[in-house]
Image: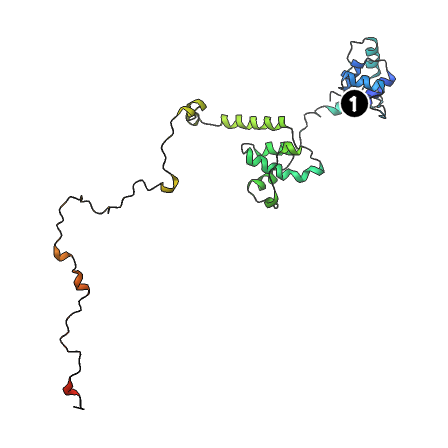
Amino acid sequence: MNKPIMARATAVWLVDNTTLTFKQIADFTGMHELEVQGIADGDVATGVKGFDPIANNQLDQGEIDRAEKDPAYKMKLKFNPAAVGEEKRRGPRYTPLSKRQDRPASILWLVKFHPELSDGQISKLVGTTKPTIQAIRERTHWNIANIQPIDPVALGLCKQSELDAAVAKAAKKADSMMSDDERRKLVSTEQSLGMEDEPRLPTAIEGLETFSLSDPRDDKSEDAEDTRKDSDFSDADSFFNLPDDDDDDEDDDSDDPRR
C-alpha cells in the first residue's frame, strides 16, 4: 500500500496540524498540490473531519519532524506487515448491486463481438462466473430470450482500456497458436485488393453448369444414322382400332320365339 487510507481526510489533518508544504502533503496523500491548497483555503473538502495518520499507525512523528525541517523531503508511509501483498491479491471484480442485472447483457455482447476472449478474461472484465458465461455461450441461460447485447463499457462494468488490453492479449495468443502452414496462407490487404475477382455463378443456377437437355444415355451424335427398324415403332392407328370380332353383336331374329 503506497498511499494512506482516507487520503483527503489525512490531508485535512496534516494541513491543520503541521507546517508541511502543500507539495509534501500532496506527495504523501497522492493528491494534487492545488487540491491541497484548496483544502487550506477552505474551498475543498469542506466539512471533512481530519484523519490522524499517526494515531492510525500510518505515519511516524519522526517523519513529520524530518519533513518540516527539510521542504524537499518526501515522507514515507509507515510499514505495515499486514498490508504486504495486498495489491497483488486477485479476486472477482466487485459489481454494484444496481448493475449486476446488466452483466448477462454485457456477457452476451462480449461473446458475440469478441469470441476470441476466453471465459477467464470475460469473468475478470465484468465480474461474473464461468458457468454463467458458458450458459450464455450455449444459449441455455434461463433468461436468454430477453437478454440484449450491450457494451460493458457503456454499462460501466469495465473500462475501455481494460477491454482493449484483453482483446489485444487474446488476439496475440490466437496468433501465436496459428501453425506455420496457416500463417503462410494469409494474404496481405494490399495483395487481396490487387487480386482479380474470380468468376462465380449466381446462386440461383449454381450446380446447373453441366445441365443438358440431351439424353446422357445416348452416346450417338445427331448426325449418326438411325439403325432402328420400322417394326420397332408402334403404328398410331393400332391404338385406336379394336380387334375384329367374328361374332355378330346383333341378336339373331331366328332365336326370337315371337317370330
**Which quadrant: the C terminus?**
bottom left
Q: Of 67 and 25, which appears nearest the observer?
A: 25
Q: Residues within 10 Å of mark 1 (few under 14, many from 20)?
A: some
Up-down: is 41 above or below 104?
above
Q: Of 84 and 178, which appears nearest the observer?
A: 178
Looking at the rendered structure, the kind of residue marked 1 is Ala
**Which quadrant: the N terminus?**
top right
Q: Of 223 and 180, which appears nearest the observer?
A: 223
Residue at 69 percent of width and 37 percent of height: 99
How far from the left and from the top, in percent, is residue 221?
18, 43
* Image side of residue 141 versus residue 83, left or right: left
How far from the left and from the top, in percent, is residue 198?
37, 31
How far from the left and from the top, in percent, is residue 46?
84, 24
Residue at 76 percent of width and 18 percent of height: 32
In terms of image quadrants, where is residue 201? Answer: top left
Residue at 58 percent of width and 41 percent of height: 136
Q: Of 126 and 90, which appears nearest the observer?
A: 126
Label 1 element class: helix
Mark 1, residue position:
7
**Visible residue check, residue 256:** yes
Up-down: is 70 above or below 206?
above
Number of callouts in the render? 1
